[in-house]
Image (tube, rainbow, N blue to C red):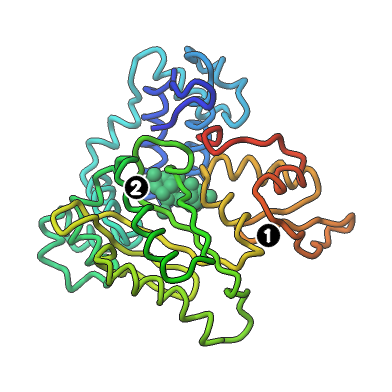
Amino acid sequence: TVNSITSGFNYNEDICCILLELSEYEKNTNRNLFKYEAYKRAAAVLASQPKKITSGKEALKLKGIGAKIAKKIDEISQTGKLEKLENIHKDDRSQAINLLASVSGVGPAKAQLLVDENITSIEQLRQNIDKLNHHQQIGLKYYDDFQKKIPRMEIEQIEAIVKKHILDFDKEFVITVCGSYRRGKAESGDIDFLITHPSFKKKRKKSSDSSNLLKKIVHILEDAQLITDTLSLGDTKFMGACRLSPDSVARRLDIRLLPQGQYYCGVLYFTGSDMFNKAMRAHALEHGHTINEYCVRPIGSLGVVGEAVPISSEEEIFEYIQYPYKTPEERNY
Ligand code: DCP
Ligand code: MG
Ligand code: MN
């Protein structure tokens, strides 16, 4: 669930939960990303309110909530439930699609294909592993483990192990755990590492030197018995599984290796939340800049996008687009 920005308490949790379920339904069953985003945005807006919203009329005044969602909020406020969601709960196909899409690597399209072949449970999926690619097979293998949230304390331990091994190998690496952990959350869905090194340059052509660096990092962490499985591995992005010890819960681990010049835009982006990123990007555009996970660029009067601005801290990005600085803990919306 989502928390209020200021107090960390969500006064509208019941409505938020229903809207987030609707967003999942739109993404997985209808594959309507527009509605998926609209419900998520509405839930985030409600979660950030300092008080309980008690009518659709009140909700309609909030930025990001339109007439259709306001009407649903009205129904929830008055009856404590939403007829539309009750019906979705009764829809077996939709429930099965949601379940299969909760396997790491299985997207809505794949989940629908499987359900159309009458594969509707995790049990049945296990009997059809030949229908899954490598990522999906690992996702299924660790299905129960990956469902579990990761306590902050465990991420601290994993962070210490990763830093020890990588910095022992070369002390010039810079390593930051981003994602919900950096936003101060008590538990996280996965672990998001961002790493940079002065010798790692923006790649133009295939240079074997730079394309081996992330593989080297992964090998070190495999030798340390931390990384157990690879879901995907490229020159800049690793997705996989790790665990503290052979009888610990397996965790989803993402590592991104970035050139120094892109590091702080990367840290900002991968710290999130995704709602915060959207709000910040929108603000940047209003102030004549475009930001993404790699860089900040000015937009000229004719709409021409300029050269990337040199950035050497997260604060500089806020300053550059004239957005009041927010600590990672203040980015939880
Ligand atoms: N991100 C984004 N837009 C997306 C996906 C991700 O802006 N569509 C950014 C913001 C996220 C960050 O990447 O905070 C990391 O993605 P995660 O999916 O790991 O999300 P979190 O770390 O925030 O939450 P969780 O605890 O579920 O991992
Ligand atoms: Mg994460
Ligand atoms: Mn992640």
Q: Secondary structure at mark 2?
A: helix
Residue at x 15%, y 59% (from the top left corner): 246
* Nearer to us in this view, 140 or 196: 196
Left or right of residue 243, residue 29 in this image: right
The disc placed on residue 155 is: 2
Whichever of callouts 1 and 2 sits on the residue coming sooner in the sequence is: 2
The residue drawn where x is 20% and y is 60% is 140
Q: Residue at x 29, y 65 (%)?
A: 227
| Residue topped by disc 1 | 295
Q: Is residue 323 above or below residue 5?
A: below
Q: Amino acid at mark 1?
A: Cys
Residue 275 image-quadrant placement: top right
Q: State left or right for residue 318 relative to residue 178.
A: right
Separation (CA) of disc 1 from disc 2: 28 Å
- Asked whether residue 295 appears in the rendered view, the answer is yes
User: Residue 328: x percent and y percent?
Assistant: 54, 39
The secondary element bearing badge 1 is classed as loop
Query: Where residue 202 appears, x then y in whole percent?
Result: 63, 74
Going by the numbered disc 2, the residue's amino acid type is Ile
Q: Is residue 117 left or right of residue 105?
A: left
Q: Quadrant of residue 139?
A: bottom left
Where is residue 325 drawn, in percent x and y? 67, 36
Residue 26 visible, this angle: no
Residue 15 x, y percent position in the rendering:
41, 24
Q: Residues within 10 Å of mark 1 (few under 14, many from 20)?
A: some
Q: Please name the residue shown 50% across and 62% down the image.
A: 195
Q: Nearer the viewer, mark 1 or mark 2?
A: 2
Q: Residues within 10 Å of mark 2 (few under 14, many from 20)?
A: many
